[in-house]
Amino acid sequence: MNHKKPLNMTMLCDFYELTMGNGYFKAGYKDRITHFDLFFRNVPDDGGYAIAAGLEQVVDYIQNLHFEPEDIEYLRGRGIFDEDFLRYLKEFKFTGDIYAIPEGTPVFPREPILTVRAPAIQAQLLETFLLLTINHQSLIATKANRIVRAARGRAVMEFGSRRAQGSGGAIDGARAAYIGGCTGTACTISDQLYGVPAGGTMAHAWVQTFQSQYEAFKTYCEIYPDNAVLLVDTYNTLKSGIPDAIRAFNDVLKPRGITKCGIRLDSGDMAYLTQTARKMLDDAGWPECKITVSNSLDEFIIQDLLIQGAQIDAFGVGERLITARSEPVFGGVYKLVAYEDEQGQVIPKIKLSENVAKITTPHFKRVFRLYDKVHGKAIGDWLCLHDEDVESNRGRDGSLTIFDPDATWKKKNLTDFTVRELQVPIFQKGQLVYSLPTLQEIQHYCQQQMDTLWEEVKRFDNPHNYYVDLSERLWETKYKLLTQNK
């Protein structure tokens, strides 16, 4: 099929969203205000946290929601949609409210990353795009952050475009990886669209094109003397690759007084090769030459390499980052948690399951993060009803009682803490009320927020459980609905 015009992302929806929309319309529910939460149940890789990402693309999607004439004709051709519903779609636009946790925030299972309050048809139609966007970018941002932390302050470049699942996976994946802490990407269009710094030097084909490896290196140094990073493993890394690189540096860069340069390794025993390469470069008078490695890296391999004493200054990470290969599904869901009756009263709704993790937390909620006053570290997150706050729940001694969402008996009291509300208004009555930060601001914010987590929460193996608890009223609401619906 030849697409002569850009795809209308409004049509990127599950078909049942349209059949339900038609059903809501015919049943007289098109104007019923509903509340949906977008949340996830498990952290990828059995980690202790995830990173929220994708909100900017959600904003762009909401602002462009509409049905083209050809979309209406396609739906009419299916022969199942009411003509009044199709006329409604012709004038369709989003008129509801959206609240979200800002991009770059560490988030945890079963708390709403994003909440939609909107007429039923509108809220239902958003499901697929919101999920695919938040799921994908949160997954990649989370994986990138794990890899960046494993690198212990060394630069990590995202190198995965050619292994991503489609163009969107490459483009938006590079954006998410930058939020997670990567210094840049190999994906040029992500730099053009989002400002993710793009970089790169040469492939093996460059070296193979010339009559000799030395000639390839020398020519590259002459063309890019201020960014001479040479790929040294096309033939034999130690016998010819590094010696030819040193010769090119001596012949081209040294006479110009340039000491900034680098080599890259893409194969072999990285621990041994980088240790040997470092000694060869230092002995040849190039102590400032940086060593970059790539080739199927992830957080665990990087961690092991550094434990083994590998001499690495930067990492290029491809397929295992851009595809989150170890666990490539984020698992976010979008569930109805309430609707409003004709008087505007919020009626909580719950989804039950024999699987306790799939039981939803009902009602229109607020999300707060509690911080230890002494260390400034996050203690846990606290969910309450939309008309509650922390102050109204404090006891006479100033303590806050929090309730375990999965237990009818487990509660505890907190004292000496500070608090911050996590969700912020994004849309109000269909209008954008949120100032989108720059990508660089999001990355910096993410780094700051990660510093508020205890190291025990951030470790790769058996991380400490971060608690997301409930207010007493929300806990009572949940268990009342559980009892009523048994």
Image (cartoon, helix red, strand yellow):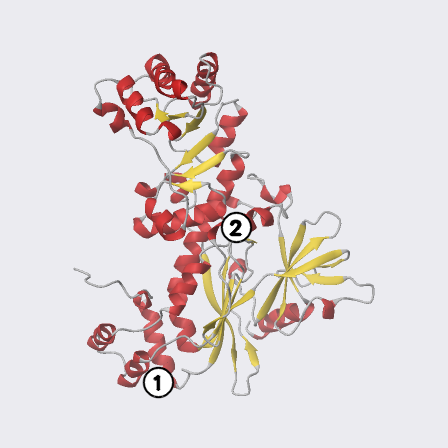
**Which quadrant is the C terminus positioned in?**
bottom right
Q: Quadrant of the N terminus?
A: bottom left
Q: Under tag 1, what secondary structure?
A: helix
Pointer 2 or 1: first along the chain: 1
Give the x, y percent position of residue 285. Answer: 46, 14
Residue at the spot of label 2: 50
Residue 252 in percent (x, y) is at 35, 20
Nearest the viewer among 315 and 248 is 248
- Callout 1 amino acid: Lys
Tag of residue 26: 1
Q: Nearer the viewer, mark 2 or mark 1?
A: 2
Above or below, 71 against 190 in this view is below
34 is higher (above) or lower (below) than 250: below
Residue 218 falls in image quadrant: top left
For image coordinates 46% across by 22% down, the residue present is 271
**In this orientation, does residue 325 appear?**
no
Q: Position of residue 440 (x, y in %)?
A: 49, 49
